[in-house]
Image (cartoon, rainbow, N blue to C red):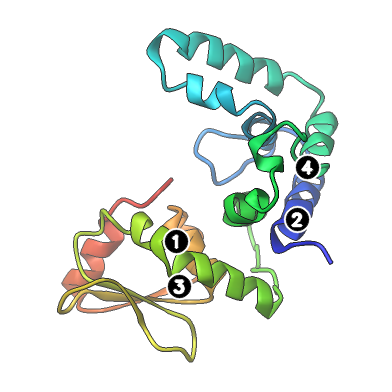
Amino acid sequence: MPSHSAAERQALADALTEAGPGAPTLCSGWTTTDLAAHLVLREGRPHVRLAGGIAPLKSWAAQQEQDHTARPYADLVATFRNGPPRVSPFGLPGVDERANLLEHFVHCEDVRRAVPDWQPRELPGERQAAFWKTISGVFGKLMLRRADMPVSLQVPGGQPTEMRKGVGGVVLTGEPGEIAMYLFGRKDHARVQIIGSEEQVARFRAAPMRT
């Protein structure tokens, strides 16, 4: 049975194939072609991404990204679908599941939800549980570090899980995948509810999340 990350990898590859090259995504300034190139570079040549943060190497890194974007779209999608190269850090046992589960899910929804009349996918409960395990732990606290108020996360029918301690604040409720979309900055495309005072809710909505 494929891992949840592997299943989301195939779902993302399917979404990219269905959308086609040059289609819009929720990633600001990126088309499906840009996203496919990013995914291939991220796993196959992670040093390029690191080089992009080093001033003397930015031009070189940008050129590598442009070169990948120029590759045939179908080739990019097929390369991503087949998984990371054996020599990639993402090819090490267990790394794909830990590092890519939410990456694959969110980017799949970046493609799916960039068109009108989208609907959430019906995902297995085990996959939603895997999302929840990640977002309700240290990772979620890191994503909420700039909220500057008490925040709890809550799934339908569950008890709130306190992420930032304090009195008052807000409770972010929804399915784990929807909460993940919100935490990754896709606020307008996440089906969540924010419970709290009007002032606190407004402050929380304005707080920057990961993009």
Whole-Å distance between the Cαs marked 2 and 1?
22 Å
Residue 48 picture quarter: top right
Residue at the disc numbered 2: 6
Residue pictured at 70% horizontal, 21% vertical: 68
User: Quick one: which residue is furthest to the front in this view?
Assistant: 93
In the rendered structure, which disc, 4 or 3, sits on the residue that comes first in sequence?
Answer: 4
Residue 129 picture quarter: bottom right
Tag of residue 83: 4
- Tag 3, which secondary structure? loop
In terms of depth relative to the viewer, which is nearer, 138 or 123?
Answer: 138
Q: What amino acid is found at the position of numbered circle 1 in the picture?
A: Tyr
Whole-Å distance between the Cαs marked 4 and 3?
31 Å
Tag of residue 182: 1
Label 4 packing within 10 angstroms: few (<14), some (14-19), many (20+): some
Residue pictured at 54% horizontal, 16% vertical: 61
Q: What amino acid is found at the position of numbered circle 4 in the picture?
A: Gly
- Tag 1, which secondary structure? helix
186 vs 116, left or right, is left
Residue 82 placement (x, y as % from top left): 83, 42
Residue 199 placement (x, y as % from top left): 17, 70
Residue at the disc numbered 3: 192
Q: How many marks?
A: 4
Mark 1 touches mark 3? (CB < 8 Å) = yes
Q: What amino acid is found at the position of numbered circle 3 in the picture?
A: Val
